[in-house]
Image: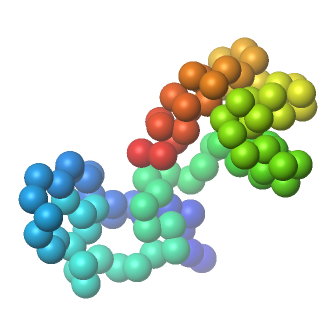
């Protein structure tokens, strides 16, 4: 069974120079290509639910952060703290989850 995340993932470092192999998570050609190569852990129940809620927001026509927040709040999907969404909160959450 294929793992849901890459247990061998090396920590990334910010690229300082645009040279092949520098600043990459793995060196090209040196890492096993796992399906979830950049995932450090399997997604949580909250992350899966958020992904579903975002998909519903996009499907219903939301494009801007304001529209996405409106959709999440209209569906009563709360953030990880149990609060209503704000644009700042959505931006922060996406930044954290995108790392």
Horizontal side, residue 43 vs residue 56: left or right: left
Judge whether 73 appears above or below 98 on screen.
above
Q: Residue at x 66, y 35 (%)?
A: 65
Q: Residue at x 78, y 50 (%)?
A: 58
Q: 86 and 4: which one is in front? A: 86
Horizontal side, residue 91 vs residue 16: left or right: right
Query: Can you say which quadrant of the picture contains the N terminus?
Result: bottom right
Judge whether 4 appears above or below 40 on screen.
below
Q: Whole-percent x and y of residue 24?
A: 24, 63
Q: Whole-percent x and y of residue 97?
A: 51, 41
Horizontal side, residue 1 vs residue 68: left or right: left
Q: Quadrant of residue 27?
A: bottom left
Query: Is residue 72 in sight in this rendering?
Result: no
Q: How is the image coloured?
A: rainbow
Q: Quadrant of residue 78?
A: top right
Horizontal side, residue 50 vs residue 29: left or right: right
Q: 71 and 24: which one is in front? A: 71
Which residue, as the protein is rendered here, is positioned at the far bottom?
A: 29
Query: Is residue 17 in sight in this rendering?
Result: yes
Query: Can you say which quadrant of the picture contains the C terminus?
Result: top left
Q: Whole-percent x and y of residue 14?
A: 20, 49
Judge whether 3 appears above or below 70 on screen.
below
Judge whether 1 appears above or below 40 on screen.
below
Q: Whole-percent x and y of residue 16?
A: 11, 52
Number of marks drawn = 0
Q: 84 and 6: which one is in front? A: 84
Q: Residue at x 35, y 79 (%)?
A: 32
Q: 27 and 66: which one is in front? A: 66
């Amino acid at each position: 069974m294929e793992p849901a995340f890459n247990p061998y993932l090396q920590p990334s470092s910010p690229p300082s120079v645009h040279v092949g192999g520098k600043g990459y998570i793995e060196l090209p050609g040196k890492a096993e290509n796992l399906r979830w190569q950049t995932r450090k852990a399997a997604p949580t129940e909250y992350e899966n639910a958020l992904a579903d809620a975002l998909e519903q927001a996009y499907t219903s026509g939301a494009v801007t952060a304001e529209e996405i927040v409106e959709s999440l709040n209209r569906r009563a999907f709360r953030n990880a703290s149990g609060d209503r969404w704000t644009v700042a909160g959505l931006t922060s959450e996406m930044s954290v989850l995108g790392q």
